Image (cartoon, rainbow, N blue to C red):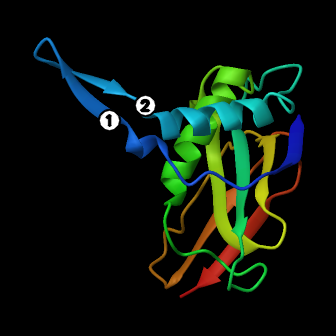
Amino acid sequence: MKVQFFMAMIPPTKTYQEKKVAVVKGKPVFYEPPEVKAVREKLTAHLSHYAPEKMFEKPVRMVTKWCFPKGKHSDGEYKATKPDTDNLQKMLKDVMTEVGFWKDDALVASEITEKFWAEQTGIFISIEELLSLIHISEPTRRTPISYAVFCLKKKTTTTTTTTTT
């Protein structure tokens, strides 16, 4: 199963890390300030249009490309400023859980996240189920070469990747 879509919007810059703490009856209580609630509502409104009919139940790879307004930057240039990708992804995956992409975002076993300055702003998301990984082997000889052999259930061939360092 694979789901892929682009949500045209100005990506939110407020993140899950911006929760606040209040002390109520001597105990800390965490809450979302209005700006963070607004981000959650915005993501919920957009993501609900793309939720799959059937939830993902197996491990998935999630590719996310955050496209922020380019301003003085070149279209497609990497964005190396805040917010951090891990903070952006936390809120996104929590909302995706809430709207029914999966029961638990722990199913995201492989993740690629990128931030760009872009003419067309929004968030591109691609989610696909992963094939089962049966075997990973490392060389027993002492050389500067490392490799991994992946034997996939649905394939009869073996793929070998060799990297020389």
Q: Kindly identify the residue that appears in the image at 73 percent across and 39 percent down.
A: 132
* Front residue (pair 115, 112): 115
Q: Is residue 80 visible?
A: yes
Q: Residue 38 in the image: x percent, y percent?
A: 59, 36
* Front residue (pair 139, 76): 76
Q: Can you tell which quarter of the image residue 79 is in?
A: bottom right
Q: Kindly identify the residue that appears in the image at 53 percent across and 32 percent down.
A: 37
Callout 1–callout 2 Cβ contact below 8 Å: yes
Amino acid type, residue under disc 2 in the picture: Glu
Instruction: Please determine whether, in this image, residue 98 is positioned above or below residue 11.
Output: above
Instruction: Please determine whether, in this image, residue 103 is positioned above or below residue 82.
Output: above
Q: Kindly identify the residue that appears in the image at 74 percent across and 67 percent down.
A: 160
User: Distance between the Cα atoms at labels 1 and 2?
Assistant: 6 Å
Amino acid type, residue under disc 1 in the picture: Lys
* Front residue (pair 38, 159): 38
Q: Residue 91 in the image: x percent, y percent?
A: 56, 39
Q: Give left or right: position of 80 versus 30.
A: right
Q: Is residue 59 visible?
A: no
Q: Kindly identify the residue that appears in the image at 81 percent across and 39 percent down.
A: 153
Q: Give left or right: position of 118 versus 146.
A: right
Q: Which residue extends farthest left? A: 26
Secondary element under disc 2, as helix, strand or loop, is: loop
User: Which labelled disc corresponds to residue 41?
Assistant: none
Q: Which residue is mark 1?
A: 20
Q: Which residue is mark 2?
A: 32
Q: Earlier in the sequence, mark 1 or mark 2?
A: 1
